[in-house]
Each structure stands twice: as structure tokens, then as C-alpha cells.
Amino acid sequence: MSHEPRTKGERTRARILDSATELFSSSGFNAVSLREIAAHAGLTHAGLLHHYPGKESLLLEVLSRRDRADAEGLFPRILEPGAPEPPRGERLRRLVAVIARNSETPGLVSLYAKLSAEASAPDHPAHSYFVERYRRLRTEVGALLEELFAAAEPPVKTEPGPAAVQLLALMDGLQTQWLLEPDAVSMEASVHDFLCHYGLHMDTAPEQGPVTC
């Protein structure tokens, strides 16, 4: 699980990751050098290499750090097999909360948008990471929707797998539109509208399933 860095080494690695996240977000992976990241973090090039042997390993750790933070509240069994999960309604609320939080972190949204596009090339260092990430998300979001559809009144007669693919595509597409014109796009409201088409709503107690719109 995530924790505040305590040792000197942990604090240094956190500073490197913060700098890499900022520079990757603003310029893209290919345009940023390790020397630039080291300088931004207040380190020498050799000092950075002591913690991360290459730019590819640093990129994957930047991506993994954010995903671990999200998985902790949404799908904890990804991090710890067998870990108890929050009730289905609460997991849905937390999923929408991630979207709301993204509205406050344009740099990270930009990073994911740029890197996911760059990583479509098979030789990109993050290609396998994004392939696996989307496989995992399709599985976990599909399983969550399956629970929610079955608990709805009346039950939703829709295949959860394709609905999960549509929801993930909507979230990614909304991020791109929001980056281009933030005032014209409400990511959270658009996802709420999508869920309402399936009779799922946020305004209910955590221990209950979402109610119909």
C-alpha cells in the first residue's frame, strides 16, 4: 500500500518521480532526457542513475505509482490477492471520484493521454504496460458492472464486458476533449450520464447498490 516516503532514499526517489512526471507531462517521453530530469530534481545524472538505471524504468515507475494509488481504493485485490473490496456501490463512486480528481491534475491527464498514444507503437517502452493495464481495467470494470447490473432494479440486461470497454473509451476520449477545451467538457457529468443510461446512479448509501436514475 502507498505510504509517505520515510528514508532518504525513498524521499529522493519520490522527488525523481515527481520531476519525471512533470517533465513527461509537459514534453512527452521521447523529448525528455535523464539529465533534464536529474537537474529538475536537484541531482546529478549519476545520482539519478543510482536509483533508476534508465529512462524506461523511470517511466514505468511513474505510471505504476499513479495506478497503485487508484487501485488501492478501487480494486485492492490487484495489489493484494484476496484483499477485501469495498461494496460495489462504493467502488463505483470511487471510480467516478478518480475522474473528478483528474480534473484537478491536468499534467497527469496529459501524461497518460500522450504516453498511451505513443505506446501504441510496439517498440515503445511502455507498450506492454498499457496493453496489460487495459486488459486489467476491462476485467475489473467489467466485473464491477456485472455486479451492479445484477443488483439493479430491474436487473440490467446488458453484457458487462462491452459496457466496460465503452466506459473506458468514454473516459479516455473525454480526457482528450477536456485537455483541448476544459470549460466545454465536464468529464464527471458525462460519465454520470453514461451510467444513467444503464440505470446506475450515485445518490445512494455506500452499502446499497446504485439506484435507477
Image: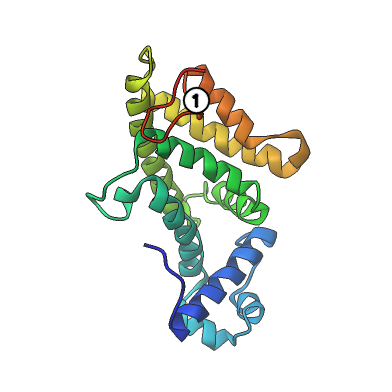
Point 42% across, 68% down: residue: 3
Query: Looking at numbered disc 1 in the image, what kind of residue is underneath it?
Result: His
Q: Is residue 113 left or right of residue 61?
A: right
Q: Is residue 125 visible?
A: no
Point 49% across, 57% down: residue: 66
- The residue that label 1 is drawn on is 201
Q: Which one is nearer the viewer's eye here, 119 or 201?
A: 201
Screen quadrant of the N terminus = bottom left
In percent of width and height, residue 85 lies at 31, 44
Number of labels in the image equals: 1
In percent of width and height, residue 4 lies at 46, 71
Where on the picture, by quarter, is residue 155?
A: top left
Q: Is residue 47 above or below residue 179?
A: below
Which residue ends up furthest to the front in the rendered image?
205
In percent of width and height, residue 6 lies at 44, 79
- Please name the colour scheme applied to the rendered image: rainbow
Q: Is residue 5 left or right of residue 22?
A: left
Point 62% across, 75% down: residue: 37
Q: Is residue 15 visible?
A: yes
Helix, strand or loop for disc 1: loop
Q: Which one is nearer the viewer's eye here, 7 or 39?
A: 7
Q: Which one is nearer the viewer's eye here, 133 or 210?
A: 210
In percent of width and height, residue 86 lies at 34, 42
Where on the picture, by quarter, is residue 143?
A: top left
Q: Is residue 202 above or below residue 94?
A: above
Q: Is residue 54 above or below residue 195?
A: below
Point 52% across, 18% down: residue: 213
